Amino acid sequence: MCNILSQLSLTASEAVHLLFRQIQLRRGLPFDMRIPNALTARTLRTSQAGKEVKRFSSRKKFYDDLGLRGPSAARRSPGEGYSAFAQRKKEGYH
């Protein structure tokens, strides 16, 4: 990290000062940070522990398990994994 700062001709102290100044100017952090909601946090903990995770050998079997006809019937957010979508569906969020 110090190598990057030296390439920018900044000391660590100056970088921290700039960060604090940006926090003050923006009235928050100068980058996006989010705390997951309760459902997301619980789903992440559960799936990371390998609990309540379903695996499917095909999309068809996945959609059949959800009671859907196919990919066009699913309301899945872009980039959202199938296990997270299944958890939301199971909990009634879609």
Image (tube, helix red, strand yellow):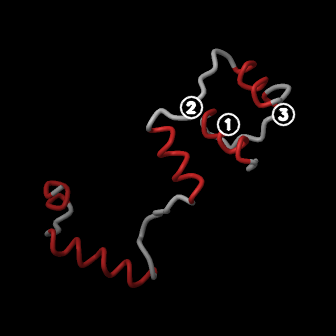
User: In the displayed structure, does residue 92 sit left or right of residue 58?
Assistant: right
Q: Residue 63 sits in which quadrant?
A: top right
Q: Which residue in the protein does label 1 denote?
A: 86
Q: Is residue 42 left or right of residue 14?
A: right
Q: Secondary structure at mark 3?
A: helix
In the rendered image, residue 92, in percent from the top left (x then y), is placed at 75, 48
Name the amino acid, label 2. Val
Kind of residue at badge 3: Ala
Q: Earlier in the sequence, mark 3 or mark 1?
A: 3
Q: Position of residue 28 (x, y in %)?
A: 44, 77
Q: Which residue is mark 3?
A: 73
State how many labels appear: 3
Q: Which residue is mark 2?
A: 53
Residue 93 lies, with reference to residue 32, above or below; the image says: above
Q: Residue furthest top?
A: 57
Pinpoint residue 55: horizontal percent, then vertical percent.
59, 23
